[in-house]
Image: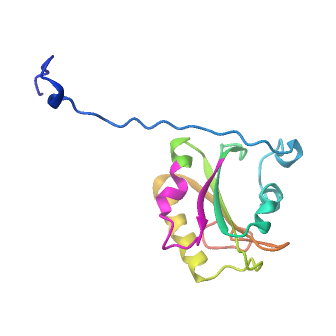
Amino acid sequence: MPEYKKEQGPDYRTYLREVKIKFRKKRIKNELIPDMPLTEAKQVVDIFYDMQDESKEKMIAVSLDSNLKIISFEIVGIGAVTTEHIKPFEVIRSSVALNAFGVILIHNHISGDSKPDSADINFTAKMKELTTLGGLNFLDHIIIGDGNYYSFAEEGFPNFK
């Protein structure tokens, strides 16, 4: 074990970065957040329905507790939301830090078509693998279009419950 020297001067000091999680409150209508568990994609879509009006693609990670109630949500990507621009671990970083039970990803297609493309399918598969390895439940990936949505869990994407 290294010997601790009380005073060695300024060059002897080593600094560590402490991570501090800060939350910003966002006011929403009370009726949007149900007092019951989020068990259906439609509930999540109702909360984030305004994403259909965005001019850029946006991805949000929704962290849930073991009762499937929302702990928090984080915008994890804006702009060209593709697998090349979003690192999978960055998507679930806050869910891991919050010790969440599960995570739901939601993003919009500015074309208005909620059908997933090959990049969406590949990204979802990578996220499923990552969350499984990390012990986090990946509950769904929802794509919002113009007045419609696509839920990977509802459509039976492999390994979703």
Residue at 31% x, 35% y is 16
Quadrant holding the N terminus: top left
Q: Extreme right residue here?
A: 31
- Give the x, y percent position of residue 127: 53, 65
- Quadrant for the C terminus in the image: bottom right
Q: Is residue 155 above or below residue 106?
A: below
Please say whether residue 88 is one of the residues in the magenta stretch.
Answer: yes
Q: Is residue 120 visible?
A: yes
In this rendering, the count of numbered labels is: 0
Residue 77 percent location from the top left of the image: 58, 62
Q: Is residue 39 above or below residue 23?
A: below
Residue 11 percent location from the top left of the image: 15, 31
> Residue 59: within the magenta?
no
Question: Which segment did they paint magenta?
Answer: 73-93
| Nearer the observer, 39 or 141 | 141
Residue 148 lies left or right of residue 59; in this view the side is: right
Seen from the viewer's position, the closer of residues 96 and 133 is 96
Residue 29 in percent (x, y) is at 86, 45
Compared to 51, does 28 lie above or below?
A: above
